[in-house]
Image: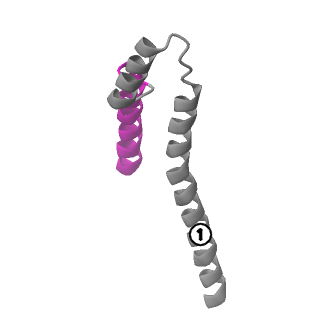
Amino acid sequence: MKKQLKISLFALLLGLLTSFAPLGARAQCVMCKSQVEAARQEKDDYDVTGLNRGIVYMMSVPYLLMGAIGYFWYRRSHAAKKGRS
């Protein structure tokens, strides 16, 4: 019972902390933001969709790699368990 209480309190605390995190978050890092602002000052019709797509692309690659590694690790561990049984 104590273990469940600790897990519940931890989940509640984690939920509270993450609920306040987006308040100060920005979509772009400081360097990207300064580059966009500088480019907007030079050109009036500066389109930032390419920059945002690039950020999403760079963000998605590590998640895809880790997901693939996790999937193959999971498959291999279950194949090893079936082989031992």
Residue name at image x 33 percent, y 27 percent: 30
Where residue 41 sits in the image (x, y, percent)?
A: 41, 12
Look at label 1 and name its amino acid.
Tyr
What residue lies at 61% left-to-right and 65% top-to-bottom? Answer: 71
Give the mark count.
Answer: 1
Q: Nearer the viewer, residue 35 or 58?
A: 35
| Image position of 4 with respect to 71: above or below | above
Q: Nearer the viewer, residue 76 or 42?
A: 42
State whether residue 41 is above or below residue 48.
Answer: above
| Side (left or right) of 10 relative to 72 | left
The answer to whether residue 51 is left or right of residue 81 is left
Image x and y of residue 64, in percent: 58, 54
x 65%, y 80%: residue: 79
Q: Is residue 40 magenta?
A: no
For the C terminus, the quadrant is bottom right
Q: Which residues are magenta?
A: 1-26
Q: Quadrant of residue 23?
A: top left
Q: Residue at x 41, y 38 (%)?
A: 11
Residue with the most extreme bottom position: 84
Query: Is residue 30 at all visible to an observer of this figure?
Result: yes
Instruction: Answer yes or no: is residue 25 visible.
Output: no
| Residue behind mark 1 | 74
Find numbered disc 1 in the image and state the secondary structure of the residue it sits on.
Answer: helix
Which of these two is toward me, 58 or 63?
A: 58
